[in-house]
Amino acid sequence: MFNGAILIGAGERRGGEPFHAVDPSTGAKGEVAFSSATPADVAEACALAEAAFESFSTLSPDARAGFMEAVADQIMGIGDLLIETAMAESGLPRARLEGERGRTVGQLRLFASYVRLGDWLDATVDRALPERQPLPRADLRRVNHSVGPVAVFGASNFPLAFSVAGGDTASAFAAGSPVVVKGHAAHPGTGELVARAIQAAVKACGLHEGAFSYLPGNDYALGGALVSDPRIKAVGFTGSRGGGTALMKIAAERAEPIPVYAEMSSINPVVLLPGALAARAEALGTAFVGSLTMGSGQFCTNPGLVIALDGPDLDKFVAAAAEALSGAQAQVMLTPGIHAAYEKGVAALLGAEGVTTIGRGVAGEGHRGQAAFFSVDSAAFRSNPVFAEEVFGSSSVLIKCSSIDEVIATIAGLEGQLTATLQIGEGDEGDAAKLLPTLSRKVGRILTNGWPTGVEVTHAMIHGGPYPSTSDGRSTSVGTLAMMRFLRPVCYQDVPDTLLPPALQESNPWGLTRRIEGKLEVAA
Ligand code: NAP
């Protein structure tokens, strides 16, 4: 169960200003009064995380992987209460949340298997060359270490997979970082249930209690205090650009600045090339609306921009999209605030010069988002930045272009994005090849003949991109590469074997694949 507590290390307490969950489908306030963590709680959680750092960061790959698997088991052990709580707090349907729970535990287990492989340690050995002339070379050995305790801000739109035990926490644990989570105020009961599961796994695995703490709250000062704490060495965040950039500023102004890995806003352009439109305009129109309206459009990979050459085939796409949209039911949005922001964004598009409304979804009551699809020509698009702003929800803008060069120029003018999609058909290879260099400079993931919504958790996945889609385009927040955000290389020069970390010792006690004298020596 949950009772609204703050969880610091192995303990729990109450305190601070109480707040309540809100059921976005009814607007009803939940019964449980959740405690807001105070600055003193932040300080205590961070001190415990620092105390846990040495033992937690030096666990063997097997021990750390075992802990992550225990977290996954504990989450599954919560049972249906987790799904029911998340449904009441997010308005998301059961099937979606059951899928998201599967993704959350699958992600923890994938990280666990990757931790066991050990290649993320990047153990590299350049042995001494005592006979080298004119000077001998020292023995040099390099391995990745955790950066230190990490602060994680849970996201509203994935109450499980991007929240308390989501990708940021999983990747930080995998890297050996104790984690302090700032719980999202939109799903506090869900957050506490998962936090208790992690707390139980820490205890069951005999780890230092400071490996994990959970600080709920709905006050920006709490997040600011957490990022400011000198014991926190990196931050993982998913949310608004305003929130992400505010935390980046706080982190940059610390006496010791630290990286904030913020995943913020993206409109994910989809380019419909002429061959694709000629072959399947209507099917593309219908499928596009499916991607646009999935989960009320509350995905960072939602297709918020469509770019195509004007003409009769595009008209067919537009007609099919309008038709599909007219049957798209309004869905409950995550929070009243997110619904209000969506309405404001759509109103700004409706009032912009040069815009045509292609179609709207079915209107709904309460905090339900009514889908919207607009079109503009490329000159109007370029003249008003409102068209390129993320409207979080099922809203998208079609830009009609007159040539492929205009498509390329339009993309070149966009801010950094998480994804770009090319719909291609017969005869489109030349145009696609012309577009790819520009796209690869703008986005983190390029896909053809699919839709950007739906992000697999794998080794090759990149869910990142140039600013402002993320704060650091060299990283990803999904997939095993995400743990690299929380690692830093340390080189040991002429350090005796017995003092070296196990990954670098001559006997290779962890049986790792290592790079020796520049050559990869693969573990048996
Ligand atoms: P948010 O407002 O950015 O909040 C995310 C988390 O950061 C919350 O815990 C929030 O604290 C904290 N926070 C925000 N601004 C802060 C500040 N200035 N100082 C300290 N902490 C701060 O995001 P949200 O509530 O999830 O959704 C709001 C908007 O974010 C949406 O309308 C959408 O535009 C965007 N969004 C984008 C994505 C994406 O994937 N790109 C995902 C979700 C949301 P509190 O709990 O105290 O508010």
Image (spheres, rainbow, N blue to C red):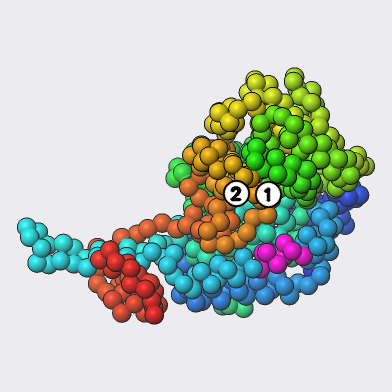
Residue 272 location, x and y as percent?
66, 39
Q: Is residue 302 magenta?
A: no
* Residue tagged 2: 447
Answer with the quarter of the image where residue 14 lies.
Answer: bottom right
Task: Tell me, yes or no, if residue 313 can be seen here.
Answer: yes
Task: Tell me, yes or no, if residue 494 can be seen here.
Answer: no
Q: Is residue 521 left or right of residue 195?
A: left
| The N terminus: image quadrant | bottom right
Tell me, yes or no, whether the two marked residues, 2 and 1, touch with CB atoms within 8 Å: yes
Vertical placement of residue 142 versus 325, above or below: below
SS under mark 1: loop
Which label belongs to residue 451?
A: 1
The residue located at (45%, 61%) in the rendering is 146
The residue located at (62%, 78%) in the rendering is 204
Q: In this view, does 479 lie to the left or right of 77?
A: left
Magenta residues?
Answer: 98-105
How many numbered marks, from 0 up? 2
Vertical placement of residue 459 versus 346, above or below: below
The residue located at (65%, 71%) in the rendering is 72
Q: In this view, does 410 lie to the left or right of 349?
A: left
